[in-house]
Image (cartoon, rainbow, N blue to C red):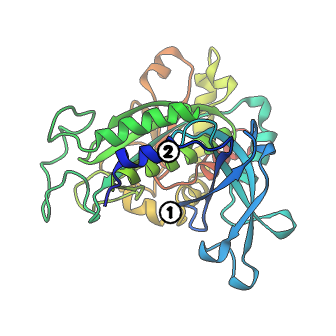
Amino acid sequence: MALNRSVLEQYLKLNQRNKVLVTYIWIDGTRQFLRSKTKTLNFEPKSPSECPVWNFKGSSMRQSLGDNSDIYLYPVALFKDPIHKGKNKLLLCETYVSNHIPTLSNKRHSCAAVMKEALDSHPWFGIEQEYVLLDADGQILGWPKGGFPAPEGPYHCGVGTGKVFGRDIVEFHYRACLHAGILIAGTNAEVMLGQWEFQIGPCEGVEMGDQLWVARYLIQRVAEDFGIMVSFDPKPKTGNWSGCGAHCNFSTNAMREDGGIVHIRSAIEQMSKRHAEHIKVYDPLCGKDNERRLTGYHETASIHDFTFGVAHRGASIRIPRHVADEGKGYLEDRRPASNSDPYSVTERIVKTVVLGQE
């Protein structure tokens, strides 16, 4: 049942007595879902390093066994809290077992090392996060019970009753991201009824993963207040319906400068030789989730083939038309699934294109 937000607001207005609430956020053992808990501090932290290392019971989150369950939370990115407002904060954390060993789900650790190695190329990213809203029964929002809506066509960037559902959640999420300091670039209704997208970026290096994970936290946190669920399933409905991706836009300094199209095409050539390696990290199940989505239909390329083209949304890699016209800019990798880990996606791209690594 949805919360009565007007009642909750009365409690959120109560005096905190100069205390600051810091919500620690981390990725659990599934590499898809987030967890959080809140700590009271006696001061307002200005950076992640000012926040204490904390811990949690990893055995409940597929990150450890019960006889050695403690997992450390190391603060890495700090944001303003749009839920509790005031001086309160959201704190993204990396997860570690003893002796500072990253958990298997901590892909940020290796991503940060790769981005440091590629620092001189200034890799920029922007990710287009698609998702679906579900009602309390798990039905896609706006779909008739036990049936199907009209075929896809009127819903993409749609306006009006019957064409979009859940806009309140989308609008609140947009403003929550802006308040938090997240670089949200835009949002729109997507091709399937009940499906939406928001875009994060441009971000440089490991910041792409930080920002997208906290934006994912916020869309779920906002939807929670409405009694609505958020699905990042790459193929939420079988049949003749669109799937959900997390298309990754990527560029380096050389690609953004005059004549950069040469470097863009070189990057695509390098990516074509590492297609299998990319597919393995573009969803948490090593390609199994994406196999349901990347079929060659619904503006996707086949998971088995690597293709590219100008303005081609059915290709693995799209060169935007304005990039081809201007001869510089970025490429769009359309293969990452909606539930992909952005740390793994961005790390793999940089390893292939910038560092030339397998």
Tag shown at residue 344: none
At x 35% / y 42%, what residue is drawn? 169
Q: Farthest bottom residue?
A: 67
At x 29% / y 50%, what residue is drawn? 242
* Side (left or right) of 309 relative to 76: left
- Judging from the image, what secondary structure is the residue with disc 1 in? loop
Quadrant in which the C terminus is drawn: bottom right
Q: Quadrant of the rendered structure where residue 74 is?
A: bottom right
Quick check: can you spot residue 313? no
Crowd around label 1: few <14 · some 14–19 · many ≥20 (10 Å): many
Crowd around label 2: few <14 · some 14–19 · many ≥20 (10 Å): few
**Amino acid under disc 2:** Leu
User: In terms of depth relative to the viewer, which is nearer, 82 or 353?
Assistant: 82
Q: Nearer the viewer, mark 2 or mark 1?
A: 2
Quick check: can you spot residue 140? yes
Q: Position of residue 159 (x, y in %)?
A: 21, 31
At x 49% / y 21%, what residue is drawn? 323
Image position of 20 with respect to 326: above or below = below
- Judging from the image, what secondary structure is the residue with disc 2 in? helix
Q: Position of residue 121 (x, y in %)?
A: 74, 30
Quadrant in which the N terminus is drawn: bottom left
Q: Which residue is mark 2?
A: 12
Q: Position of residue 269 (x, y in %)?
A: 59, 39
At x 69% / y 83%, what residue is drawn? 66
Q: Are marks 2 and 1 in contact (CB under 8 Å)?
A: no
* Side (left or right) of 90 relative to 311: right
Q: Quadrant of the rendered structure where residue 180 is?
A: top right
**Amino acid under disc 1:** Gly
Tag shown at residue 287: 1
User: In terms of depth relative to the viewer, which is nearer, 83 or 349?
Assistant: 83
Q: Quadrant of the rendered structure where residue 104 is?
A: bottom right
User: In terms of depth relative to the viewer, which is nearer, 298 or 57?
Assistant: 57
